[in-house]
Each structure stands twice: as structure tokens, then as C-alpha cells.
Amino acid sequence: MSEAVGAAWAHLPEYLGWHVVLSLSAIGAGVLVSIPVAVVSARSAAMRGPALAFANIVQTIPGLALLALFYPLLLGLSSLTRATFGFGFRALGFLPALAALTLYSMLPVLRNTIIGLRGVDPAVRTAARAVGMTRFQELTLVDFPLAAPVVLAGIRTAAVWVIGTATLSTPVGQTSLGNYIFTGLQTENWVSVLFGCVAAALLALLVDRLLALAEAGLTRRSQIRLIASAVGLVILAGASIVPILARGGPAPLVVGTKGFDEQLILGALMEDRLRRAGFATERRDGLGSQVIFDALAANDVDVYVDYSGTIWFDDMKRGDMPSRAQILKQMTQWLARTHGIRCLGRLGFENAYAFAMRSDRAHAFHIGSLADLASHAPNMKIGGDFEFFSRPEWRAVRRRYGLNFAVERQYQPDFMYRALLSGDVDVISAFSSDGRIAQYGLKLLSDPQGALPPYDAVLLVAPAHAKDGRLIAALAPLVGSLDLKTMQRANLMVDQDMGKRTPEQVAGILDRRISDRVPARLTARGSGP
Amino acid sequence: MAAIMIELRGLTKAFGERCAVAGLDLRVETGELMVLAGPSGCGKTTTLTMINRLTEPTAGDVRIDGVSVRDFDPVALRRRIGFVFQDVGLFPHLTAGENVGIALKLARTPKPQLNARVSEMMRRVRMPSQEFEGRFPITLSAGQRQRIGIARALAGRPSIMLMDEPFGALDPLTRDELVEEYRTLHESLNLTTLLVTHDMTEAFLLADRIAIMHQGTLVQVGTPHEIATVPANDFVRALVEHPRRRARELAWVLGASGT
């Protein structure tokens, strides 16, 4: 427990720093945009309706979806500016998070500012005109000072929302306190999840108190309170930027990972090796399959591990199924030709989609293959991860074997295994390299008609580093170094409840084996098979 | 004949179908205190606000010292004219002193002059700045607030004062006191004042001349004596008769109980 807390503490300056910088920037941008719109809207009903409707609609979009939507939007915009003006920008990370959170912060600021301005006594506003104030003086000397407490109350609401929602910027590649929550969920590290939640809550509370101080300063005309509030916010922002700037130096290499344990282990492993080779690195964890591939092609991510079948189906849009070696060869050529992406080669293991059942249930129904499953499917429930049911592999399998399940349910991977064990679902879409298949003694169903492609783990390098000898030399030893047993054991060490290790610890163990040129064999602690 | 400070020529304001002010002609002489009197809703306030362009007329013109107000920038015009409201309209977020100094602040008056002028104006309305400068309007009585309102209107050294029922919301004692004090201020500062009221007693006690309005038009303009002795029609007669009758009733009631 204390070890887990210690590990979480070590990340705090970076995660908290980014979280503060991101949140404060978004709130600041939100206020800068909302106030002029509110000033016009307060006087014009024709403007007020549409402005508030827009802010309301933005608010109804779930935070995660709003953040995710900005990535393709910015990616398109970036390629547009690259084509027209010759420069692009990073569509992953800070920008989409900032844009989405800025929009998210608008409603309370907009609404409160409009209410505040419209609430100013008409007699006072007439007096302002009668003493000879211009419209601008009326606004700055009378309207805003009188509306300030209401406006600030709106900013406080926005601040609390933004700081909470900023935890969702992890999947679009922006480091935040959400990293604790997302990676904690993946590895069932509840200490990490709790740590992230508490840190975000405390930060929200602190910023809210500082803004409350400013609000009190305005209503009671207390300069001391206003100054204290401003100083507090400046110290907070300054203290957050320092650890980020301190990391400065050359632009770090970005190591990307998708959202599951194996990817976190491999991400840490690559990071270890790159750092030893003298590179500065940073991580983008928990990215979706398509986001991470596009990001690599756009050089927003420099290196990550993908799986041959995923690229074959998703990106090459191939429906045919040649041999494993052919797929690997054609994929490598296609990546280089169409995107300039360099495939360094197979890591050695395969992480295929595989359908798994509890052994006792499989035995009772005499199910050993996907073909056997067809007649039982209409009475069964299937569980998959968030992607699975919209993936082409699932469509291919359904078509080939005529599978029609009574119920399809989506789970976060850890909960998917629990659902299977507890009987909530009968079949799940597991991953062949998952250590839990062996741990729980699950039955993997065979694929006699070959509907599922091979999923060799492959190391991909972004176009910008395709000829970077130092980077390739640092990562090349990983090629062919991890067989399926090793990866399953490694995954289990992170997944298991007893003797749980962090992905970084497991990566360290793998790294030492690879560096010692000893065939990487691991023994899982606890009740491994 | 004295110079004309404010001249209204065929001044008209229509709100949709309704004509609030219909073709008003009126001349206010320099140094004069004219009271614009009449029942509620007769167009008095609308007339007043057209002079400093808080309201734009539908037709007709206002001339200040011979120059049409249309030739002034509205903001510059308003800074030259003092305006006092019935509901006072003090800025609640500013202190009494800051309220008095607001017009000077807008004119970018240097701080020492501004402070000196604020102190002087507050002394003039008998609100010593040592005691009242830092007080917020909410902590003042209605009479004190109106004194500050008058000081604010006077701080920018206007030659014209427009007053919209300035004493209407005050208790009778405070009101009598303030009416008298304003009359003194008007004379010592050489002001030209146009004051709107529906209270004929106040009009008689305060005015050099009274202009009586009824349903958007002027019915009679004259000295209090002229109005009282030669009312132009039954409407004016009724208006004049009211304070007279009250005075008689009072004399009788007080006389009867006094002996």
C-alpha cells in the first residue's frame, strides 16, 4: 500500500503541474471568450438565445466525447494549415484538451455574466449615462463592478467543472491527474485511482477557495483579499509550470500506449531503453487504436507497439487472410510506402482476439470452437471491451460462424473477466497474451475457419524517426525478445491481486533479462499456473 | 430681456401610437429656476430627458445657449448639464465621495483638484466630507442620499441643472429643508434650473416661473402669482385650488384646536 502511494507521489509534480496549467489555461481562455459574448448577449436578445443554446448543447456532450472529438478536428485542421501555410501543429495532447475544456467552461461564465449585467438596476444605468459616461465607461465603471460577484460565482463553477473534467484529457494524450485514474483502472491499482481523484478534488477545492477570496474582495471592496487571491493563483500557476519547464531541453520522444496493461508494460520498457540511450521521453497513455495510429503517422507519437491484425483490418482495410508471414511482410511495406512509418519487427508474441469461456461451462455445453458456439449463441450473453463490437474482426467472426448472441455487453477489460467468472456473461473477447486466461483456467475457443487474423506485436516508429539510428539501436534489442509465455507472465504480474507489481516494475524485470541477453523467462509470484 | 439658456422648439416625442410630448415650445431664461408641473404621466420627465439627450425627440429641437443639442456629442452634452433623479441613482458600489467626484473623474481631473472639489461640494450640501466621504449610499438616509445626488450633479460645474422630482421621496421636514437649501445653491452658483414636480405647493414655493403641462402639451407658463391669480383654464384652476384649499383647511383645523 505505502509502496503504491510512494509510486503515485513520484508522479505528482508532473501530473499535477500539467493539470493546473491545462485547467487554468482553459478557464482563462473560457473567460476571455465568454465575457465579450456575454456583454453583447446581455443587450441583444437575438444574440442571447443562440449563445446560451450553444453553451448548453456543449454542456450536454459527455466530457470524454467532447475531448475525443477535438483530436480528429485538430488533425484535419493541422493538415489543412500544413497544405496551405506549410506548417502544422500537434493535434494530440495539450491543444485538443485545451479547446474542449475551454468550451466546457463557457456555460457558467456566460450565463452568470449575462444574469449579472442584466441585473444592474436600470436607474443606476440611467444615472451612469446622465453623468456623461460613454458605453464603455458604463460597462467598466458601473455594470461590471456591480455584476462582479455574480460573474465570479460563474467563474468558480467553471473552475470546479474544468478541474474535474480535465482528468479526462489523458486519452487524448495530455498528461493530467487523469493518468492516475486511467492507468489505475487498467491495472486495478485502486490506490492510484483514489490518489488521482483526491488530488483533483483538493485542487478544485483550493482554486475555488482562492476565487471565493477574490469574490469576497470584490463585494467587500477589500484590496487585501483581492491581492491575496491573485498572489495565490500566481503561486499555484508558477509552482506548476516549474516542474514542466525543468524537464525542458530537447523535445522529448513521445512513447504512446493503448489502454491496457500489456501496452503500459511495453511503454515503460521502451521508455527505459530510450532514456538509457540518452533520449528525453514522455508518455501518452491510454490512447484509442485509431487515435494512436493517426498520431504516429502525424509524428505526434514517436513510437508504440501495435498488432499486425489491427493494422491489416483497420488501416489497410484488407478482408483477405494470407499467411502470418505474408501479413507481416505486406503490412511492413504498406506502412513504409503510405505513411513513411518504420516497422522494426515482431516483438515475438502474438496478442490475438480470442473468445474465452469458463472451462466448466464450455465442458458442459461441449463447446470447443467458434463453430460449436453458433447453436448456443442465441441463449448466451457475450462481453467485450469498448472497441470490440464495432471492430471488423467481430463482424468477420459473426458472419463466418453465424453467431447471434442474445446480449452484447461492453466492459472495461478487468471487469470483463470478472463478469465472465461470475456468470454475468457466457463468452468474452479475451486477448491471447492475457495472463488471466491461464490464471483463471479459461477455455479459449479455436477458430477452425480462420476468421481472425494473426496479431503479431510489432514495434512502430514515426516517419520523423524512421532513419534515426540511435533510436533504432536502442529499441532493436526488443525485437524477437518476448515470447507469448513471457508476456502472459508479465501481464499477470500487473493484473493479479496478490503480489501485484506496477507496469514499470515489470518493465524493469523484462529489461534486465533482455539486456543480459538471457532468454526472457519469468516466474509469476503468487498462484500462477 | 434676459438671455435664453434653454429653448424647446416644437419638441415632440411619440412612443409608438402614443404621443408623450406634443409640440412643446418653452424658453428658460439664464439664471431662472423654472418648475415644470403637472399630473403624473403628462410628459414632464420625457421633456426633461430630451434636453440632455437621454431620450431622443421624434420631432422638434432643443437649443442650449442658442446651439442645437443635436450638434453636441451626447456624452459631452451630459457632462455639461447636472441631472438629479427622484430615485437618486447613486452608484451603490461607490462611496459618497466617489459618487460626488465621478464626473470629475470622467473628465480626468487631477487628483488634488478632484479631492478639493469633492470636499467643497459636500460642504455645500451640508454633508461634511470628513464624516461622509467614505460612506456607502446604503448607509445614508434618503435625505442624505439626495444631498449627495445634488452634490454629484453640481461637481462638474454645470451652468444648467435638470431635476426630476428631486424631493418627492423625502419626508416633509427634510424636504422643506432641502428645497430651501437648493434655492440658495441655485442663486449662489448662478444656475439655470428646470425642475419637474407634480407637487404644486413645492412649485409655488420654489419657482421663478411655473410651466404647467397637461397630456403632453403646455397649458400655461407664468410666475406663481400669474398662475394663481389668472389661471388659463379649469385644469390650471383645479391645480391651483388644491394647495389653497389645503391651506384653508389647515388654518381652520389648527385655529380651532389652537384656542
Image: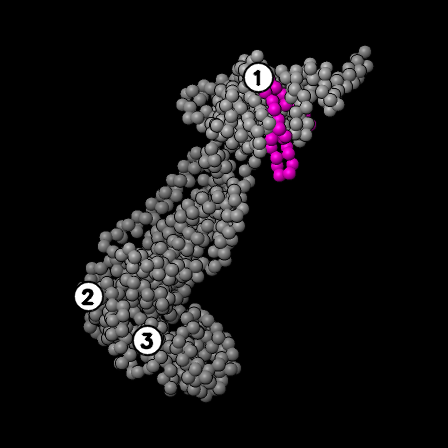
The spot of residue B82 in percent (x, y) is: 53, 24
Image position of B51 (left or right of A188):
right
Subunit under mark 1? B
Instruction: Tell me if label 1 and label 2 are in contact, CB under 8 Å.
Output: no
Q: Amino acid at mark 1?
A: Glu
Which one is in front, A224 or B39? B39
In terms of secondary structure, where does tag 1 sit? strand
Q: Chain of mark 3?
A: A
Q: CA distance from mark 3 to mark 2?
A: 24 Å
Pinpoint residue A415: horizontal percent, then vertical percent. 44, 70
Identify the coloring: one colour
Q: Measure the C-alpha gap from mark 3 to mark 1.
A: 95 Å
x and y, in percent, of residue B214 in the image = 68, 27
Which residue is under mark 1? B29
Q: Residue at x 46, y 50 (%)?
A: A106
Which stretch is magenta? Answer: B12-39
Q: Is residue A89 left or right of residue B1?
A: left
Local secondary structure at mark 3: helix
Residue indicated by mark 3: A312
Q: Nearer the viewer, mark 3 or mark 1?
A: 1
| Location of the C terminus of chain A (image quadrant) | bottom left
Label 1: few (<14), some (14–19) or many (≥20) C-alpha neighbours in 10 Å: some
Look at 36% across and 46% down and name the residue there: A237
The residue wearing badge 2 is A467
Label 2 chain ID: A
User: Label 3: how many residues lie within 10 Å, few (<14), some (14-19) or many (20+)?
Assistant: many
Q: Earlier in the sequence, mark 3 or mark 2?
A: 3
Q: Amino acid at mark 3?
A: Trp
Mark sitting on residue B41:
none
